[in-house]
Amino acid sequence: MNYTSLHRLATFGLTAFIAVSFFACAKPAPFVWATDYRAPQILPAEERQVRPGDKVIVHVRGQDALSGEFTVAGDGRYRQPRLGLVEVGGYSVKEAESRLKQRLEGWLDSSLIEVSVEHQPQSISVLGSVRRPGRYALASGMGVLSTLAEAGGLDDFADRDGIYVLRGTGQATRIRFRYRDLADGAHAGFELRDGDVIVVE
């Protein structure tokens, strides 16, 4: 198994652990029904958060030893030559650039430093009582029902009233669905977003 496969496996495992931990609490976390949920505005690409698996592209004019492409590890950090580990996970591209420039202050003029981020392909994760849990590529307009179908559908132990989408980092928003509503097309307008986690109880 190569590094990329191991990294993807580790990232998915971390996502699964967070989601399972989220549902393992003795007191269930609050949720919002899908009919009452109002999605926040989608951020422009430059304001999207840097996540594990993304590539940080650093170009320092006249300093090839400091330049290169670096993959963000599962802990949200990457290793910058001569600086060591730099934490960028959870920050926007602009914030990541600012953090790097701060670390390099005293060495270089910040105007010589250019930072960009190549985001990993958009994906979602499906966990719990489905036949093929895992990570799936996110296509434009993809919804909960079509994703559950791609995951093989609900298994024999699934709670058809206990389908949730976890959205966001930290204190994730927990959006609840009923399978019969999904099948009736009640939530056809609900589009999944990069990083969403579907959990079927």
Image (tube, grey):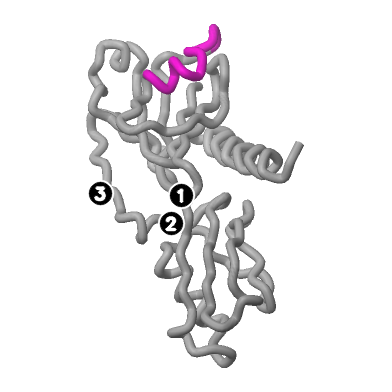
* Residue 50 position within the rendered picture, expressed as x and y whole percent measured from the top left: 48, 57
- Residue at the image position 26 percent from the left and 23 percent from the top: 187
CA gap, disc 1 and disc 2 = 10 Å
Instruction: Provide the residue span drawn in magenta.
Output: 146-157
Which residue is identified by label 2?
49
Relative to 98, 68 lies left or right: right
SS under mark 2: loop
Above or below, comparing residue 56 to residue 140 in the picture: below
For marks 1 and 3, give the one nearer the viewer: 3
- The amino acid type, in three-letter code, at marker 1 is Thr
CA gap, disc 1 and disc 3 = 16 Å
For marks 1 and 2, give the one nearer the viewer: 2
* Residue 86 position within the rendered picture, expressed as x and y whole percent measured from the top left: 60, 69
Above or below, comparing residue 153 to residue 53 in the picture: above
- The amino acid type, in three-letter code, at marker 3 is Gln
Residue 6, located in which quarter of the rendered image? top right
Q: Are marks 2 and 3 in contact (CB under 8 Å)?
A: no
* Residue 25 position within the rendered picture, expressed as x and y whole percent measured from the top left: 55, 36
Which residue is identified by label 3?
41
- The amino acid type, in three-letter code, at marker 2 is Gln
Q: Are marks 1 and 2 in contact (CB under 8 Å)?
A: yes
- Residue at the image position 43 percent from the left and 37 percent from the top: 196
First in sequence: mark 2 vs mark 3: 3
